[in-house]
Amino acid sequence: MIVRADELVKYAPNRDAADAYAQARAVLADAESAAESLADQHVAENFRIQIRTRLDDIAGRERGGLL
Amino acid sequence: MKLGRTPDEKVRTPPGQRLTRGWPVLHAETIPPFDESTWRFRVFGLVANPFELSWSAFKGLPTVDLTSDIHCVTGWSKLDNRWEGVAFTEIAARAQPLPAVTHVVTHAPSGYTANVPLDVVMDDDVLFAWSHDGEPLQPKHGGPLRLVIPKRYFWKSVKWADGVEFLDHDERGFWEVRGYHNDAHPFAEERFSWQER
């Protein structure tokens, strides 16, 4: 799901970027829910960090930053 | 478009990749503006001769014309891309990396970076390219200047490159800290960092 979110962001230049970011956010929300159900909390926390980083990246892009 | 593969194409296409004749546009950054009069390329870090180049000075360096294949981690490959630009070795020869240098990080104006070991970029197929298939490199593909490292997944080939830093240690780049493989060999399918364990 995280890779899918990355692809949505990377392909955003070819389409409506706001739509792509919204879809990426939705996929990341699903990924976060899936992480909650993991038995290994260390792995789950790593996923949560990766998800938060991507949500921050998307927010930065929407604020008009280069990244 | 799905293409049948010739024997040569089969050998040159890494596992898990599909061939395309188009050139998909993928990037996580906003395309930075390019002003020829203010653009600078910075070479810094552990080098005997740090320097900056204007666009005209960069274009005045000795050029190379190389043909190589692209392999994107998202699963597409594009063969026989003709690039024109400046060999990485040309930049390194001017900068004179100190003996302690082990890695190189290439920078873009957005803050995007990608890291590789020094020996990878000192390969004779690595260049900073401003032209693709005889045309100026389009901004959406990294123009005016991008790094090209054919033997690694294409995210290592930094678009809109404006600097290169020589380091005595490894420092993961933008995608490398986001769970993608540090080495990124396409033929070993090194896509994700969990494979590094």
Image (spheres, rainbow, N blue to C red):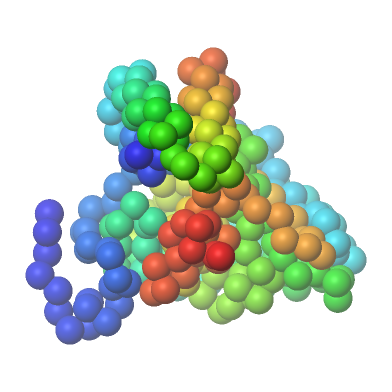
In the image, farthest residue toward the top? A63
| Residue B15 in view, yes or no | yes
- At 28% from the left and 28% from the top, the residue drawn is A15
Work out which quarter of the rendered image holds the N terminus of chain B and state it: bottom left
Give how far across and how far down residue B167 sits, in percent: 79, 61
- Position of A16 with respect to B91 (left or right) is left
Count of number-bearing discs: 0
Work out which quarter of the rendered image holds the C terminus of chain B and state it: bottom right
In the image, farthest residue toward the front? A39
In the image, farthest residue toward the right? B48
Considering only vertical position in the picture, is B144 above or below A18? below
Considering only vertical position in the picture, is A22 above or below B123? above
- At 86% from the left and 76% from the top, the residue drawn is B99
Report which quarter residue B43 is drawn in.
Answer: bottom right
Task: Name the one closer to the observer, B124 or B2.
Answer: B2
- At 34% from the left and 23% from the top, the residue drawn is A26
Task: Name the one closer to the observer, A8 or B54.
Answer: A8
| Residue B31 in view, yes or no | no
- Position of B21 with respect to B131 (left or right) is left
- At 55% from the left and 70% from the top, the residue drawn is B126
- Position of B44 with respect to A44 (left or right) is right
Give how far across and how far down residue A67 sits, in percent: 55, 31
Give how far across and how far down residue B87 sits, in percent: 59, 69
